[in-house]
Every structure is written in structure tokens, then in C-alpha cells.
Image: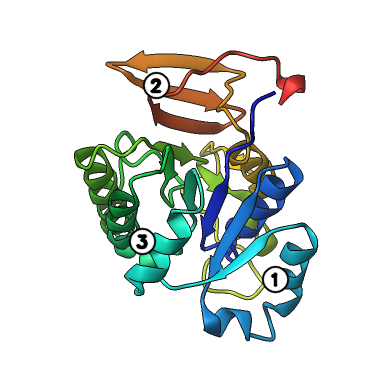
């Protein structure tokens, strides 16, 4: 087995990020987490960050708005994974600029983990959110950075505790609002499963693989990958 890729996590203390950090460290990757000074001192995050350290994760102090700290962190790794939240999604252009300057990154995974924004249909307010992700994708491609977009559809953990009720604390106790006729079908994903997938050295497919002009679209147990320039082989589900 070859040397494990060095992974830099940006947004590693967030909703999906913490699962990817954990899976990366458990997979034996030298794992680095770029964390803001304010987050390191946040009482709500102390236990999580200590858990990272105990797992062998290297904590790097830095910020999306600090170009020098971004470049310095990126130069220490092979792969950059961003899991920044929606409000910071557009700021990933700063990560892209730092990756270009560093010049050593073999793959960048921007913050996606939802629908495949190039193929799914949307209405507001999702349409505006997706427009930002689409522009980040195009910027990565224009800059010639090797990339993978992980499209995990919808994480069950977002809404199941509230039984799909928006704007209410969980669990709802008085009534449920059922959208449509109640028969709409959907597919939910697990944050833990997605974290384990993203931490794999190569991106494996267990369901299907379709090549679109050099771009591969992969379905993996409800999670899709859009990737360029990576070899993908088909395995049985039990091997993942």
C-alpha cells in the first residue's frame, strides 16, 4: 500500500466536517484541521477539538480571510477538503486562490454534500444557494484544479429529529404539516457514511459509473460523486 494522502480539512468542526475529520484520521491519513482562533477558544467546541487531537489530528490556526495562513496550511498537504457552511460557500474562492498559489494540491473537494447542482432542478430559496455552488465549480474548473464534488442528496439528521418540520424545535408535539399529497419519494443520506466515503484514498463506486466526456458521475449508496481525473473501480457494498 502506498503512502497515505495528507488531508487538510477546512470547516472541520461543522455539521459534516467533524465526521470527515474523524474518518480521515481513523483511515490513517495524516490529517490537518484549519481552525479559527475564535473556534479553538469556543467552549462549545473544546471537547470536539480535543477529540481531534487525541485522534492524531494536527490543529492549524488559520482563517479563510487570512491568505497567508491558507497557503501555509495547504503547502503541508496533498488534498484539501472544504466543509464550510452555506454562508461561507462563496468565500471558497479564497481557498481556490490559495491552492493555485501553493501549487501542490492533487485534489480539492469543495463544500457540496447536497444535490448535484449541475443536474438537479431547484426553486428559491435553494436556487440562489445552488447558484453559488455552481460558480465555485466553474471557478475550480477554469483554474485547472483536480476536483471531486460529493453530492450526498439530503442528510437525514437535518430534518428527521423535527419530522421534516421547518422552523420548529424538535420534536414537534402538536401537529405535523405534510407537504404535497404525502406520497413524494426522496432519498436520505447519513453524515457518518458520507464522512467515511470522503476519507477513502480513492473514490470507489458500488452501484454505477457513467462517464460524461472525461467527467465521471458515480452513485454510491445514495451518494453521488462528480470527479475528474481519478480512477474508479466497482466494488461490492460490503467492501466499502
Is tag 3's residue or tag 2's residue first in the polypeptide sequence? 3
Give the residue number, with chain letter if any, for mark 1: 49
- Label 1: few (<14), some or many (≥20) within 10 Å? many
From the viewer's perspective, tell me whether residue 150 is left or right of residue 196: left
Real-space Cα distance between discs 3 and 1?
Answer: 23 Å
* Mark 2 or mark 1, whichever is nearer to me: 1
From the viewer's perspective, tell me whether residue 18 is left or right of residue 55: left
Q: Is residue 153 above or below residue 161?
A: above
From the viewer's perspective, tell me whether residue 165 is left or right of residue 87: right
Give the residue number, with chain letter if any, for mark 2: 216
Q: Residue at x 29, y 37 (%)?
A: 118
Front-lying residue, 202 or 15 = 202
- Label 2: few (<14), some or many (≥20) within 10 Å? many
Residue 152 x/y as whole percent:
52, 41
**In which quarter of the view is residue 74 placed?**
bottom left
Is tag 3's residue or tag 1's residue first in the polypeptide sequence? 1
Is tag 2's residue or tag 1's residue first in the polypeptide sequence? 1
Question: Would you say residue 86 is visible in this rendering?
Answer: no
Count of numbered circles on the image? 3
Q: Residue at x 59, y 13 (%)?
A: 234
**In which quarter of the view is residue 193 placed?**
top right
Residue 77 x/y as whole percent:
51, 49
Image quadrant holding the C terminus, namely top right
Front-lying residue, 90 or 33 = 33
Q: Residue at x 31, y 46 (%)?
A: 122
Give the residue number, with chain letter if any, for mark 3: 89
Q: Residue at x 52, y 25 (%)?
A: 219
SS type, badge 1: helix
Real-space Cα distance between discs 3 and 2?
Answer: 24 Å
Q: Which mark is residue 64?
A: none
Real-space Cα distance between discs 2 and 1?
Answer: 35 Å
Amino acid at each position: 500500500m502506498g503512502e497515505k494522502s495528507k488531508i487538510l480539512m477546512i470547516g472541520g468542526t461543522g455539521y459534516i466536517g467533524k465526521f470527515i475529520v474523524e474518518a480521515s484520521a481513523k483511515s490513517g491519513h495524516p490529517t490537518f484541521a484549519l481552525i479559527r482562533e475564535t473556534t479553538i477558544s469556543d467552549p462549545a467546541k473544546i471537547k470536539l477539538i480535543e477529540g481531534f487531537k487525541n485522534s492524531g489530528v494536527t490543529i492549524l490556526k488559520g482563517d479563510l480571510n487570512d491568505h497567508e495562513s491558507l497557503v501555509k496550511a495547504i503547502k503541508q498537504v496533498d488534498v484539501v477538503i472544504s466543509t464550510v457552511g452555506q454562508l461561507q460557500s462563496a468565500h471558497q474562492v479564497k481557498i481556490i486562490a490559495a491552492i493555485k498559489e501553493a501549487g501542490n494540491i492533487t485534489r480539492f473537494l469543495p463544500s457540496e454534500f447536497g444535490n448535484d447542482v449541475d443536474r438537479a432542478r431547484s426553486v428559491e430559496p435553494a436556487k440562489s444557494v445552488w447558484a453559488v455552488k455552481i460558480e465555485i465549480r466553474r471557478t475550480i474548473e477554469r483554474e485547472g484544479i483536480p476536483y471531486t464534488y460529493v453530492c450526498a442528496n439530503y442528510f437525514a439528521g437535518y430534518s428527521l429529529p423535527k419530522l421534516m418540520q421547518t422552523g420548529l424545535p424538535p420534536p414537534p408535539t402538536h401537529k405535523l404539516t405534510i407537504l404535497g399529497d404525502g406520497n413524494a419519494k426522496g432519498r436520505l443520506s447519513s453524515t457518518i457514511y458520507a464522512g467515511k466515503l470522503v476519507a477513502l484514498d480513492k473514490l470507489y463506486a458500488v452501484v454505477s459509473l457513467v462517464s460524461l466526456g472525461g467527467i465521471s458521475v458515480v452513485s454510491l449508496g445514495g451518494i453521488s460523486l462528480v470527479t475528474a481525473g481519478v480512477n474508479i473501480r466497482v466494488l461490492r457494498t460490503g467492501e466499502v
